Image (spheres, rainbow, N blue to C red):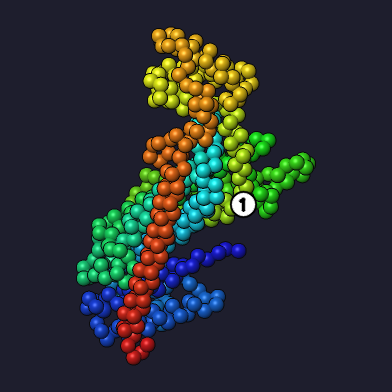
Amino acid sequence: MTTIRQPDAFHWLGEINKASAVMVVEQGIVPPTLAAPIAKAIATVIANGARPGADRPGDYLALEALLIEAGGPDVTRVHSGRSRQDIGATFIRLFLRDDLLVLLDSLNQARDAVLNLAERDPDAIVPAYTWGVQAQPTSFGHWLGAYEAALARSAERIRQCHARVNLSPLGSAALGTSSFPVDRPRLAELLGFDGVAENSLDATQIAPADLRAEAIGVASSAALTVGMLLADITQQYAQTRPWLILNQGSRTGVSSIMPQKRNPSGLVHLRRLASTVAAGASVFAFQAHNVPSGMHDYKPDGPDAMLADATRMLADLAGLLPDFRFDADRALDEVNAEYSTTTELADVLQRDADVPFRAGHHFASDLVTYGRANRLRPAEIPYAEAQRLYAHAVAGFGLPASLPLTESVFRETLSAQGMVRASKGLGGPQPAEVARMLAGQRGRLGVDRDWVAGIRDQQARAGGRRDAAFAALRGADG
C-alpha cells in the first residue's frame, strides 16, 4: 500500500492558488469583480479534493481543468505571471522546509537520548580508542558528549539549510518572470517564506538541485555520526563481558542454533539504515550531476525518501539508547587491564620532576613493554622494577638514575581516575568540565527545540493570514 504524504502536492497547489488569488487582485492584475468567483472556484476544488477517495491532482494543468469546471475560464487568470516551473520549484521548497523541521525534531530526540544516557553516570571511567587500539581513559559523559556535539552540528546545519530553503521562487514564472506586475514578496509572505529567492533563473532551474543536495548532505552527516557511534558500541559485542550492552528484549535476537547468542539486532538494523542514508546523498549527486539546468525530469525526487529514512534513523536511535545497560565497573576494569594511562606518567615526570618529555616517554614505553611481557597490569608492576627501568631508560639522556616519583605518586599517576582528574584542558574529561559541557549541551538542545516551535508558529500564523485574505476575496459569496 502506497502512503500519500501529507500535506501533498494537491494541498500546496490549493494554498499557492489562494496566495496567488490574493496577490493578483491586490496588484490589479485581475479586476475586483472577478475576485469572488475565482476564490469560490478555488475553494470548491479544495473542498472536492478533501472528499474520501477524491482525485487530488498534483500537476497544475490537471488541477486547472477542475478550476475551469468550477468557475469558468476566467479562473485561469489566477495563473498570471506563473508557470509550472516556479510552482514546481516552490513545491520543492515547501516540502523541504517541512521535511527539515521533522528531521530536526527527530534529531533533537536523539540528542536528548544521548544526553540522558551520558547523565546517568557521567564521571565513570571508560576506554577511548584511536586506530582501534585503547588509547587513553576518558569518562562516560565525555565520550557520549562528543557524539552529542557532532549531532548538534547537524542540527546547526539543518537550521542553516532551512534558512536557504525558506525563500520563495513563486512569481519567477518559467525562469525570467513576466510582464505582469507580480508582487513576489507578497506571495512569499502569504506562503510563510522568510523572503524571496531573488534571481528568477536560479530560483526555478538551478536551486532545486543544489538545495536538495544540501538537505540530504545534512542528513548524511548525521548518518555518519550515528554510524560511528554504533560502530563504537558494536565493538563491545566482541568482548566476553561488554561494558555497554543492550538489555534482552525486542531489540535483541537469538540464534537458531547457538543458545548463548543474544544478537544486537537493533544495532545492526540501525547501522544499515544509517548506511542507506549516507549512500542516498551520493546517489542523488550522481543522478543530478552534469544535467542541464532546465532538465528537471532527470533530477530525482530521492531526497524525500532519504530525509524520511534519516528521520526514522534518528528516531530509532532515540528509542534504542534507553535500552542500554552500562557496567561502570567493567569499563574501569577494561581500562585498568591496559597501559593507556602511561601518557600521564611522561607528563607528570616533566611537569613535577623536570624530566624532559622524550626521556619520560622512553621510560613509560619501556614500562609498558616490561608489563606486557610479564602479563602484569599497570597497578601490578613492582615499584622496584619501575625504578630499575627508569634508570636504564634515562641513562642515554645523561639524567640522574633515581626515579623522581614516590611509590604513591607513581601509583596514582598510573591510575585511570588520577589521569582523568588531572586533566586541565578546556573540553577535557575531568568531572567539572564534563558537567559544564553537558549543561551547555542541554541548554543548546532547548534552544533548538524552541527554534522549531517558533518556525512552526510562524508558518501557522502565515497560514492564518493567507486564509483571512483569501476569505476576504470571497466576500458575500463565501
Quarter of the image with the N terminus in it: bottom right
Residue type at mark 1? Asp
**Residue at the spot 43% in from the left edge and 11% down from the top edge:** 400
The reply, left or right, for residue 220 in relation to residue 261 is left
The reply, left or right, for residue 378 in relation to residue 361 is right
Q: Position of residue 367 (x, y in %)?
A: 53, 18
Q: Nearer the viewer, residue 161 or 1?
A: 161
Does any portion of residue 297 appear in the rendered image? no
Question: From the viewer's perspective, is residue 441 above or below residue 372?
Answer: below
Q: Position of residue 265 (x, y in %)?
A: 65, 47
* Mark 1 crowdedness (10 Å alpha carbons): few <14, some 14-19, many ≥20: some
**Residue at the spot 52% in from the left edge and 50% down from the top edge:** 119
Does any portion of residue 246 appear in the rendered image? yes
Q: Position of residue 240 (x, y in %)?
A: 68, 35
The reply, left or right, for residue 444 in relation to residue 51 is left
Question: From the viewer's perspective, is residue 254 above or below residue 341?
Answer: below
Residue at the farthest bottom position: 476
Quarter of the image with the C terminus in it: bottom left
Q: Secondary structure at mark 1?
A: helix
Q: Nearer the viewer, residue 77 or 44?
A: 44
**Residue at the spot 28% in from the left edge and 72% down from the top edge:** 80
Question: From the viewer's perspective, is residue 403 above or below residue 179?
Answer: above
**Residue at the spot 46% in from the left edge and 11% down from the top edge:** 401
Question: From the viewer's perspective, is residue 340 above or below residue 12?
Answer: above
Residue at the disc numbered 1: 323
